[in-house]
Image (cartoon, helix red, strand yellow):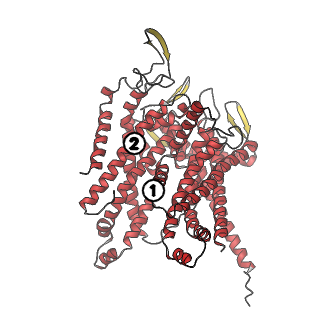
Amino acid sequence: MDSGRPDIRVLGRRAAAASLRFLASSLATFLVILFMAGLPLLISAKDARVEIDPERVLAAARGFLASALDGTLRTFKIGRTAWDLREIYPKFLSVSFLYTAIPGAAGILLGTVAGAAARSRRRGTLDRLTDLALGTPDFLLILAVQLGAVWILDTLGIDLSLGGNSRLALLPLSVMGVYPFFLARRCAAEASREAETSDYIAFARAKGLPEGWILRRHLGAAVIPRLEAELPVIVSFMQGSLFITERAFALPGMARLLFDSAFSGQRKHMMWTIYQYDHVVLSLTGLAVSGLLVFAALRLGLGAARKVLTRE
Amino acid sequence: MNRRLAAGLLLLALLLGLALFSDSIAPHERGFMKAVRYDTVDGQEVMLVSPEPPSRFFLFGSDGWGYDLFSEMIHGLGWTLSIVFATALLRSTAALTAGLALGALRPTGLRRRRFSPLASIPGFILAAFVLYPVTINSRLPPVALFAVQSSLLALVELPALAESFAARSADVLGRPFVEAARTAGAGVPWILRYHVLPFAFTDWLESLPVQALSVAALVGKLGVLRIFVGGTILTVDPVIFLPAKGEWLGLLGYYYTGVRGQPWLFLAPFAGWMLILTCVGLLSSGTKAAWARSRRIEVPE
């Protein structure tokens, strides 16, 4: 007889299959990262010809796995200065995560509210401003914000780098929040305007339901699903901006570690930098993990908000 | 010809003229530098040390090494126009071709957008990894290096664009008039040529300014990493990464650290880039309007 409870064996099989899929995709992702990190070793330009040498990538990957297994992969160097990776890696990972998750969540929340507020208005100046902001290259926006902050500091004497010495600085957080804010605003405004002309909203009003209740329901049922669909794009874009933000504001995060490992790391002599393959693999892995965590956190947040608003 | 197209062509002609006659227009030859110079101010001879703000001698100012920004920009304009237009054209055309093929192969069941951890690794990092060994003190001929750089930049965001063209093709292929053509015996190439391409072409025109913007963002970010279109000259004593050709977007990335003390180094290439962006926008919307008019389609302003 069917007791209405899910079969424990079916659940077990599903959990095992999901775990296997997760392990397989993690392994595949890691193998791709091993290859990506080897790209600068794969290609060289000698005697006016481009040469490809896969053996160098394989040797570097083998070296990475050997040093990871025997525990020698512990230090990161710039010049003669060395850092213990076990200390800096978790800190760098948390900086990258926080500088993406916090502005991501805040930007989506504020953008959704701003978009929903425009539901009964036609497209106007704010919509054009949104299009302009989304059409401006992020690195230009970041540098323009820096320029603006410097100008305000020099002209008015107001220091905008509030909390510049603390763990979270306001300026880079604001810069990282620009894209999710405008994208969420655009999505919310479009979805709200569509919903506003729909029959079910007219029916709800005809029934005499309060406006607040209607707004909550349509935010949950119409706006949040659209934001959920756009979330991969938002997170991917923010990861790209993170690299320039960490570099421009000198934040100690995974993207910065990647830059230092690849382009200005350990020096053989005084001038020449050495490409640190092992640390590039670690920082690329850190970026992937950070992106995945940010996506999971924002997805959970949107899901919870949808449940609360629609009560379904 | 409509006004937007005419204005876009005029601006393009002006920019091309500047690029073609750069050697005659630029006040100094490529690579000219003057870190210290003497000038007469209020009847007195004074020593001026770089970086200098805009003046009669350095029209757009000079950088810390004494390079004349105006001359560098005039010499680099050709590279900027080439990389932006060629790469955007290459990427959009490749994406259109791939999108038509994908749309025809799987007209229904386009995949839902999902998140991959690999999407957390920005495309420009991969481009930088590939370009770094071939760009720094490159021994490749300039044209070959440009071809490598442009092809790679076109590849970076190609899959997403191809997917959007595929979605468009699949949408058109599912319409009743295509079904009617199929029933009447039309083959896939004929349907793609006469039913899908006219719709996709408008999208292709619309994609050009967006792709130009995307290419510009990529080139600028690579400039932050000291990877410049046309090559990077690395000197070892002192260690300096110099843009070999003065390409504008690379200069934006190169001079971003000057935002604090020497804003002209950022503002001059930024203004230049806005001019190119305006040109791309006018050309795109003007061509779209002309195309719509030739097919007697109403296009809102």
The numbered mark 2 sits on a residue in which chain?
A: B
| Residue in the picture at 53% in, 47% down | B126
In the picture, the quarter occupied by the N terminus of chain A is bottom right
Q: In front here: A83 or B60?
A: B60
Query: Residue B30's spot in the image, x, y percent?
Result: 39, 26
- Name which quarter of the figure residue A157 lies in: top right
B128 relative to B36, above or below: below
Q: Amino acid at mark 1?
A: Gly
Task: Say whether residue B277 is left or right of residue A83.
Answer: left
- Residue A43 visible (yes or no): no
SS for dot 2 = helix
Q: Residues within 10 Å of mark 2 (few under 14, many from 20)?
A: many
Circle 2: residue type: Ile
Q: Which residue shows up at 71% across the image and 42% down it? A: A167
Q: Say which of A123 and A289 sits in front.
A: A123
Q: Secondary structure at mark 1?
A: loop
> Is A35 left, or right, of B148 in this rendering?
right
Percent position (x, y) of residue A52?
50, 44
Q: Quadrant of residue A181?
A: bottom right
Asked if residue B279 lies left or right of residue A229, the reply is left
Image: A214 above or below B69:
below
Which marked residue is nearer to the observer: mark 1 or mark 2?
A: 1
Is residue A195 in view from this perspective? yes
Q: Nearer the viewer, residue A307 or B97?
A: A307
Badge 1: chain ID:
A
**Alpha carbon distance from label 1 to label 2:** 34 Å
Q: Point out which mark residue A124 bears.
A: 1
Residue B281, numbered label: none
Q: State the residue position of label 2.
A: B83
Q: Position of residue A280 (x, y in %)?
A: 63, 44
